[in-house]
Amino acid sequence: MAPKKILMIILDGLADRPVADLGNKTPLQVAERPNLNWFAENGMCGLMDPIAPGIRPGSDTSHLAILGYDPHKVYTGRGPFEAAGVGLSLEPGDVAFRCNFGTIDQEGLVRDRRAGRIREGTSEIASDLDGLAIEGADITFKEGTEHRAVLILRGKGLSPKVTDVDPHKVGVRYLKCQPLEPEASKTADIVNEFVEKSRKILENHDVNKKRLENGDLPANIIMPRGAGVYPHIQSLEEKFGLRSAVVGGVTLVKGICKVAGMDTIDVPGATGGLDTDMIAKGQAAIRALESYDLVFLNVKAGDICGHDGDADGKVKVVQRLDQMMSIIRKEIPDDVVMAVTSDHTTPVSIRDHTGDPVPLMIYGKDIRVDDVTSYDEMAVAKGSLGRIRGSDLMPILINLSNRAEKFGA
Ligand code: ZN
Ligand code: ZN
């Protein structure tokens, strides 16, 4: 059995629920998508519960499951994966947080959790907060894509058992970091001191002066959340014997892939935002298949529209993704098995992730073909893959790529 290569494409948060403004259809159903449909027609389809039926996945826990890990065992919080994604390495004992650059008003009420989706000036701000003097821990602070950043505390007796500063909604006061166990009170104090000290620095920061002049929301608070310690994860090479790479993507996804031992392929124009160059990402993924057994491609744009409640925007994203799929349709080598799916549903009506299953399609030469002819949430339910869990996907792809070990004689 000649082993085949694997291409995994995650259309982040693209799956949806019926939208009244779209005639009770989902953005996927409404959008022109001839190439996605062609793959569905020539492959096998089904539904996938990224974690388990009804469980609302985070992008992090879901990606871990899809890559073949048990998130209940290996997930220690979002912070460490974000840290890996911005190229920071953790040591045992460090506690890492995912942070948002946010905007608060004079009473401390959160106006925008993403500081107007700030894009410029975050590295200038981060360099002024990096190394901030706080007793009890060394502070590392680095910006990620857009409004995202990472905070790492290094010192003795730190604990990840603390609550978030980010209240996860607007119109309420940002929260005080609280210890979830007595031993974590030192860590909570350090986090609170970091938030207050950084507020003073941000208040008069040149980047914010410029933003206010331009009528943009200032990034006047850093809101840490998702505390975690470095996870111990077997690499994909150890687990499945796969040499693997991730193409572009937001820091969280890159971080998970890095912790899983994947190489990162940076693509010019791949921003992790709505304006990302999907064509360039598709081409880079095809090229990467020459040197890797598994290539992983995540496109975040659909999730962004879901969180923004933008149904029309999501329809346009599907159409752009379909252009990317046309490149892949033209250039995919014969010895590749490809899976296209989402890491969770992000309905525009809910503006957050839900536990609805996501469409899954697998395509490759010589694999079985079912009767499904269209790639959307309803049509794939009639496909031959039935309804699987995220953790089933890697074993299925390992088998279809002729890499599975026989169980028994
Ligand atoms: Zn996601
Ligand atoms: Zn999301």
Image (cartoon, rainbow, N blue to C red):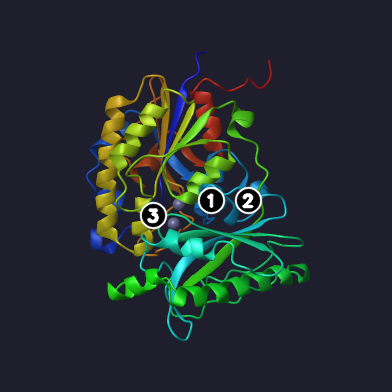
**In the rendered image of this protein, does residue 9 appear above or below residue 312?**
above
The numbered mark, 1 or 2, whose residue comes first in the sequence reads 1
Q: Distance between the residues labelled 3 and 2?
A: 21 Å
Q: Residue 317, relative to residue 97: is it above or below? A: above
Between 34 and 210, the one lying in front of the other is 210
Q: Which residue is drawn at 59% across and 33% down?
A: 236
Crowdedness near tag 3: few (<14), some (14–19) or many (≥20) residues, C-alpha within 10 Å: many
Report which residue position mark 1 lands on.
60
The amino acid at mark 1 is Asp
Q: Earlier in the sequence, mark 1 or mark 3?
A: 1
**In the picture, residue 320 is in which quadrant?**
top left
Per the rendering, the mark at residue 75 is 2
Q: Is mark 3 on a helix, strand or loop?
A: helix
Label 2, secondary structure: give it.
loop
Q: What residue type is labelled 3?
A: Asp
User: Within 10 Å of the Cα at label 2, are there few (<14), some (14-19), or many (20+) other Cα atoms?
Assistant: many
Mark 3: C-beta under 8 Å from nearest atom of ligand 2: yes
The residue pinned by badge 3 equals 303
Alpha carbon distance from label 1 to label 2: 8 Å
Per the model, the C-alpha gap separating discs 1 and 3 is: 13 Å
Task: Name which residue type carries label 2.
Answer: Tyr
Report if the CB atoms under discs 1 and 2 are less than 8 Å apart.
Answer: yes
Q: Is residue 102 left or right of residue 153?
A: left
Position in image of residue 168 (x %, y %): 49, 70
